[in-house]
Image (cartoon, grey):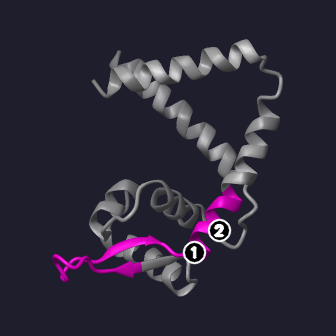
Amino acid sequence: MFERTLQFITEIHQLEDRMNDQSVNSDLTVIQQKLLQILYFSSPKNLSTLSKCMNMNMPNCSREVKKMVQLNYIQKSCPLEDRRITELSLSLEGIKKEEALLKHMKENFTRQYKHYGEDQIKLLIHAMDTLEQLLNG
């Protein structure tokens, strides 16, 4: 099961790479696009958590975040309960940018898998739901 799980994760990463290669955001690097995606689906995050999600060291992640702040895609804030913590989330511009990327990725994905029938799509969705339930215990 372990080896099969690793193989499945690799295939998912390959699919993600294909979708990113076809992106319209040529002004952003793949790393910057991934930053947007992570913060879009699970923000706010602090820099330490974000660097772990990105599998990057803190200085490199910090540098990319700084660029994205300068581009007005990421905003920083401090929670009232602890002003020492800096939380990162998407700005309105960052949300718009990520939604445009996701729209384009969905169009590419739909085009790539347009030959799938309704029954195959339902089966795949059911398999994903089952996998998620089993992995989450």
Residue 18 in the image, given as x and y percentages of width and height:
68, 44
Label 1 and label 2: CA atoms lie apart by 6 Å
Amino acid type at circle 2 is Lys
Picture layout, residue 82 above or below residue 21: below
Residue drawn at 38 percent across, 80 percent down = 76
Residue drawn at 59 percent across, 38 percent down = 14
Q: Mark 1 points at which residue?
A: 92
Specify the segment rendered in magenta. Answer: 76-101
Residue 84 covered by magenta stretch:
yes
Q: Residue furthest bottom?
A: 70
Are the residues tagged 1 and 2 within 8 Å (C-beta)? yes
Considering the image in quadrants, where does the N terminus appear? top left
Q: Is residue 37 left or right of residue 106?
A: left
The secondary structure type at the circle numbered 2 is helix
Q: Total marks drawn?
A: 2
The secondary structure type at the circle numbered 1 is helix
* Front-most of residues 130 and 108: 130
Residue 70 in the image, given as x and y percentages of width and height:
53, 87
Picture layout, residue 49 above or below residue 85: above
Q: Residue 82's quadrant in the figure?
A: bottom left
